[in-house]
Image: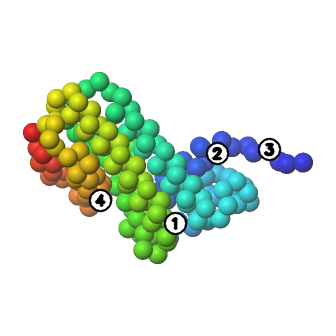
Amino acid sequence: MARHKEFEINEVLDKAMYLFWTQGYDKTSMQQLVDTMGIHRRSIYDTFGDKHALFIQALQRYKSLQAERLQLLIEKQAPVKELMRRFLTTMVDNKDFPKGCMMVNSGVELGILDPEVSTFVENGYTQTEQYLRELLLIGQNNGEIQADVDTEFLAHYFMNAWLGLRAMVKTTADQQKLNGIIDTTLRILD
């Protein structure tokens, strides 16, 4: 008879996600995962697989949570420029999350060495660019953004700016500098 799981999967997965996000894959040990997740090592292996499989599931959880946040932005009835500002400031202003971006961190740490992580991160970036393009198209349709602007190029541009900001917040606490970068980036929509 199978043993009943005494934990909520997303709850313990979130704990693993935050640990990987904060420390990276290589610096996170199985013992740290056991301690942080609050479940037995055997339960981790039975539920998630090995450390790499758990890491991939944590990345999937992160991607899913990011997609939900982006979808909420798209659904808001606010000027697109303001929504783009919110998008860019997400990680700059949020003190509830580890600094930086788990996808960026993972791509930098493992992208060259781990094809599965590299593909996953690249797909995540593509999905985010699709959300950005959708938001920019909304701006074009309601007249906030010029009709002749290439929204695909702009989505690439904003994705690059966002990734840069998400990496930069790990090395600077200068809010004025970060906000200045955001202001300059948004001028492309004027």
- Left or right: 40, with 176 as reference point: right
Q: Dot 1 corresponds to which residue? A: 116
Is 141 rendered above or below residue 59? Answer: above
Residue that sits furthest to the top in the current view: 77
**Label whose residue precedes the other's in the sequence (2 or 3):** 3
Please identify, in this view, whether the residue under mark 1 or under mark 2 is nearer the observer: 1
Label 4 residue SS: helix
Q: Quadrant of residue 81?
A: top left
The amino acid sitting under disc 3 is His
Please identify, in this view, whether the residue under mark 3 or under mark 1 is nearer the observer: 1
Instruction: Give x and y (percent) for residue 137.
Output: 26, 37
Q: Dot 2 corresponds to which residue? A: 9
Residue that sits furthest to the bottom in the current view: 113
Label 2 residue SS: helix
Q: Dot 4 corresponds to which residue? A: 167
How packed mark 4 is, by other alpha carbons closer than 10 Å (few <14, some 14-19, many 20 or more), is some
Q: Are marks 2 and 3 in contact (CB under 8 Å)?
A: no
How packed mark 1 is, by other alpha carbons closer than 10 Å (few <14, some 14-19, many 20 or more), is few
Between the C-alphas of marks 1 and 2, the distance is 23 Å
**Label whose residue precedes the other's in the sequence (3 or 1):** 3
The amino acid sitting under disc 2 is Ile
Q: Are marks 1 and 2 in contact (CB under 8 Å)?
A: no
Between the C-alphas of marks 4 and 2, the distance is 29 Å
Q: Dot 3 corresponds to which residue? A: 4
Q: Are marks 3 and 1 in contact (CB under 8 Å)?
A: no
Between the C-alphas of marks 3 and 4, the distance is 41 Å
- Left or right: 110, with 161 as reference point: right
Label 3 residue SS: loop
Q: Is residue 136 at least partly visible in the picture?
A: yes
